[in-house]
Image (spheres, grey):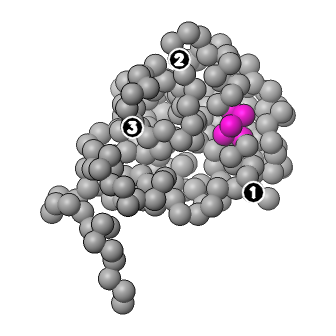
Amino acid sequence: MTRLPEWMYPPRDEGWFADDLDHFPEAPRHTELIDGVLVFALFPRQIRHTMIVDELRGVLGREAPEGINALREIAVKLDGRNRVEADVLLTTGPGNSTFLTPDQVLLVIEVISPESAYHDRMVKLRKYAESGIAHCWLVEEEDGTPVVHTYGFDGPGRSYVPTGIHRHELRSRMPFPIELNLDSLPSGLHS
């Protein structure tokens, strides 16, 4: 059995902490931390996935009111042992950090692809809710067309509740008035 490179071993007996990723140049670009465990996204991103992420970031960035920014592939430090990267997010946070905190995030969006489906739907959705992020969208494909599942934060349950399944168009009042033509998004997420 081949030994792992030294940089892959945690710097302490307790494992990895979210702040360790700021001092970890050897890590692959899309490295996340889930419950103190490193998660590497070593698979190549599909072109359509990237196109949908870019389109969503562009549309939301144009519609966002003053003081709200739409960003892509930015880390969110959920707590000391969890730091994940959202495909797209809306934030009120400053631009002088390597990560955002949940109180700076208004909406997270994950574009589901075959290699990230379980991680995005089950793990990240739960982690975002537990950290108190108000809104989450999961963008999936149904019969070759993008569909957006929207969720809102339920404070007492510290979980998300579904707020809609949107086909063809998405109209939402939260976190600000948004009208999105889903038919204009690139299709064929899984082809």
Quadrant containing the N terminus in the rendered view: bottom left
Tell me the residue at 15%/63% (across/down).
13
Q: CA distance from mark 3 to mark 2?
A: 17 Å
Q: Tell whether 72 sits left or right of 46.
A: left
In this rendering, the answer to whether 69 lies above or below 6 is: above
Query: Dot 1 surroundings within 10 Å: few (below 14), some, or many (20 or more)?
Result: some
Circle 2: element type: loop
Residue 120 percent across, percent down from the top left:
54, 49
Q: How many marks?
A: 3
Q: Start and end of the magenta stretch? A: 52-56
Q: Which residue of the protein is positioned furthest toward the left in this rendering?
A: 13
Q: Nearer the viewer, mark 3 or mark 2?
A: 3
Q: Could you say which disc has been placed on residue 190 in the image?
A: 1
Q: Which residue of the protein is positioned furthest toward the top in this rendering?
A: 66
Q: Name which of mark 3 and mark 1 comes first in the sequence.
A: 3
Circle 1: element type: loop
Residue 73 percent across, percent down from the top left:
53, 41
Asked if residue 54 lies in the magenta stretch, the reply is yes
Query: Dot 2 surroundings within 10 Å: few (below 14), some, or many (20 or more)?
Result: some
Q: Could you say which disc has been placed on residue 169 in the image?
A: none
Residue 57 percent across, percent down from the top left:
64, 31
Tell me the residue at 39%/36% (across/down).
99
Asked if residue 102 lies in the magenta stretch, the reply is no
Q: Label 2 is placed on what type of residue?
A: Ile
Rendered image quadrant of residue 100: top left
Q: Could you say which disc has been placed on residue 68 in the image?
A: 2
Q: Could you say which disc has been placed on residue 98 in the image?
A: 3
Q: Nearer the viewer, mark 3 or mark 1?
A: 3
